[in-house]
Image (cartoon, grey):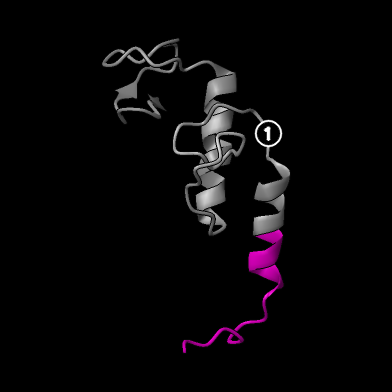
Amino acid sequence: MVVCPTCRHVNPEEAERCLRCGTSLEPDAIFVITLHEIGHVLGLDHTQDERSIMAARVRVRDLSLADEHTAQLIYSIPPGSVTRP
């Protein structure tokens, strides 16, 4: 089964397009959506920057420098070192 990244419809493994909305389910498209979702798992949020894998509508195929630096920044802060004013 392949879940459509746009409408979340569950499609059969052999589908090339979502049977509900027509979104491409090609391996490249699935890879990019997976990379985007892994960004969320790592703590990255959506960005307005269309060059970022974390844009709400992904238009790129790789991590941008901003994506890499943001993830590095998140994980370089020691636990408990951020306090609220």
Q: Where is residue 75 in the image (x, y as percent from the top left)?
A: 67, 68
- The residue shown at (64%, 28%) is 61
Region of the chain picked out in magenta, as a range: 71-85
Is 25 located above or below residue 41 in the figure? above
- The residue shown at (55%, 47%) is 38
Magenta residue check for 81 = yes
Q: Find the residue positioned furthest to the left.
A: 20
Disc 1 crowd rating (10 Å Cα; few below 14, some 14-19, many 20+) is: some
Q: Position of residue 36 (x, y in %)?
A: 54, 40
Determine which quarter of the picture holds residue 24. Answer: top left
Amino acid type at circle 1 is Asp
Q: Where is residue 59 in the image (x, y as percent from the top left)?
A: 55, 26
- The residue shown at (37%, 17%) is 12
Is 71 located above or below residue 75 in the figure? above
Q: Main secondary structure of the magenta part?
A: loop
Which residue has dot 1 on it? 62
- The residue shown at (50%, 46%) is 47
As helix, strand or loop, the secondary structure at mark 1 comes to loop
